Image (tube, grey):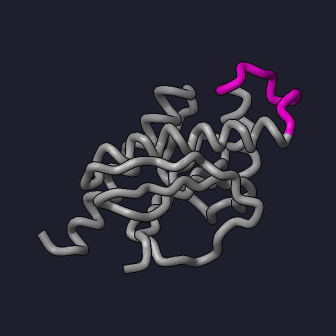
């Protein structure tokens, strides 16, 4: 299988992981993309070391970040604060990265997730998946391999 086919297959698997975590774990329905993507405001990153080395970055729009925190911490949306969104996103990154680690060549280990104060711009990625919720929100999952 060539590199492009491997990347496409990995993208499909990562999209399935993200969709399952949003819809099954957090009960947030997802939908196909339509219209321009919303701005990304929150992000977290986790490093994977071992046979596959690199980072998994999970970032989200403001409104989806608020919904994720609301569902994860069982709070009303209007009582969710910025720190709740950061905590929820770092935990979500840990969950998603753990599932991604299971489909990458192993053995490997995860670092602790780190919230990102500055979201990365364009960067070298193996996979860049956008998942949209049913209310104009977006979750972005990116895999960046370590520099060889």
Q: Is residue 107 visible?
A: yes
As drawn, the residue found furthest toward the left would be: 1
Residue closer to the observer: 27 or 134: 27
Classify the position of the N terminus by image quarter: bottom left
Residue that appears at 74% across and 44% down: 86
Q: Position of residue 68 (x, y in %)?
A: 66, 35
Residue that appears at 72% across and 54% down: 42
Residue closer to the observer: 14 or 57: 57
Residue that appears at 75% across and 57% down: 41
Left-right relation of 86 to 10:
right
Compared to 145, does 142 lie above or below? Answer: above
Residue closer to the observer: 42 or 12: 42
Left-right relation of 19 to 73:
left
Residue that appears at 68% across and 43% down: 64
Which picture quadrant has residue 16?
A: top left
Q: Position of residue 17 (x, y in %)?
A: 40, 42
- Magenta residues span 72-81
* 28 within the magenta span: no
Classify the position of the C terminus by image quarter: bottom left
Q: Position of residue 25 (x, y in %)?
A: 51, 27
Left-right relation of 18 to 83:
left
Q: Position of residue 14 (x, y in %)?
A: 38, 51
* 78 within the magenta span: yes
Compared to 85, does 140 lie above or below? Answer: below
Q: Is residue 60 visible?
A: no
């Amino acid at each position: 299988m060539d590199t492009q086919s491997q990347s496409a297959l990995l993208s499909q698997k990562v999209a399935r992981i993200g969709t399952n975590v949003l819809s099954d774990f957090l009960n947030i329905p997802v939908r196909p993309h339509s219209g321009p993507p919303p701005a990304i405001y929150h992000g977290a990153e986790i490093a994977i070391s071992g046979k596959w080395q690199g980072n998994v970055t999970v970032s989200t729009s403001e409104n989806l970040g608020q919904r994720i925190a609301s569902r994860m911490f069982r709070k009303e949306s209007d009582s969710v604060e910025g720190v709740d969104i950061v905590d929820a996103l770092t935990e979500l990154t840990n969950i998603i990265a753990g599932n991604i680690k299971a489909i990458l060549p192993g053995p490997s280990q995860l670092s602790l997730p780190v919230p990102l104060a500055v979201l990365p711009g364009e960067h070298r990625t193996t996979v860049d998946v956008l998942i949209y919720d049913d209310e104009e929100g977006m979750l972005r999952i990116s895999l960046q391999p370590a520099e060889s």
